[in-house]
Image (cartoon, grey):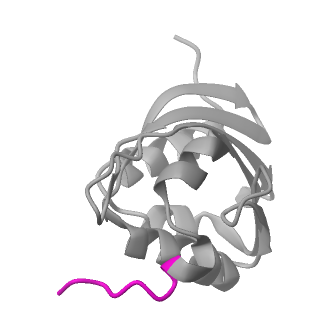
Amino acid sequence: MRKLSPNAQLVSDIFDEVAKGNGAPFWEACHDDVVWRTIGNGSWSGEFSGKQTIIDEVFRPLNRALAERATIPTRLIDGDDVIVLQARGNNLTRDGQRYDNDYVFVIHFKDGKIARYEEYCDTELIARVLPDRIAAKSIPIPK
């Protein structure tokens, strides 16, 4: 078996943790000015710059919309400074709908840290199952 590049090994390690619900290693591996892009034209699509903006505009609303959330890696393609990861979501919305999207993440590294993260997925599934991203910001989190 071929040895992974340091960036591919880092992505593999990060997603081992993400699959367990631990996102901290992902954020530790990102540049402060990381760019996140989700394809499409829906409310969850767009380009977001900076860790805090990505957290506020993508992850907090997503965490409010989902009761259970996991992203399971299925294939990693090692391109050294560009890593491609295929994954499958294992998610449940707060209103009981399955949100099990298929993903391809194209992860660009600069100086050993994630500089750009591109998410390719089924945007029709997003539109059908998830609430509008802006509306999701105000969903109360159950205690």
Q: Quadrant of the C terminus?
A: bottom left
Is 79 on the left or on the right of 138, as rendered? right
Horizontal and vertical percent position of residue 60: 49, 78
137 above or below 92?
Answer: below
Q: Quadrant of residue 68?
A: bottom left
Magenta stretch mostly in which secondary structure?
A: loop
Is 19 on the left or on the right of 61, as rendered? left
Residue at horizontal 50%, vertical 77%? 136
Residue at horizontal 48%, vertical 68%? 62
Q: Pick the residue in front: 12 or 116.
A: 116
Q: Quadrant of residue 3?
A: top right
Horizontal and vertical percent position of residue 20: 29, 52
Q: Is residue 139 magenta?
A: yes
Numbered range of the magenta stretch = 136-143
Q: Residue furthest left?
A: 143
37 above or below 5?
Answer: below
Residue at horizontal 66%, vertical 63%? 44
Q: Is residue 2 magenta?
A: no
Q: Residue furthest front?
A: 128
Is 90 on the left or on the right of 133, as rendered? left
Q: Pick the residue in front: 32 or 1.
A: 32
Residue at horizontal 80%, vertical 59%? 111
Is 122 on the left or on the right of 50, as rendered? left
Q: How many marks?
A: 0
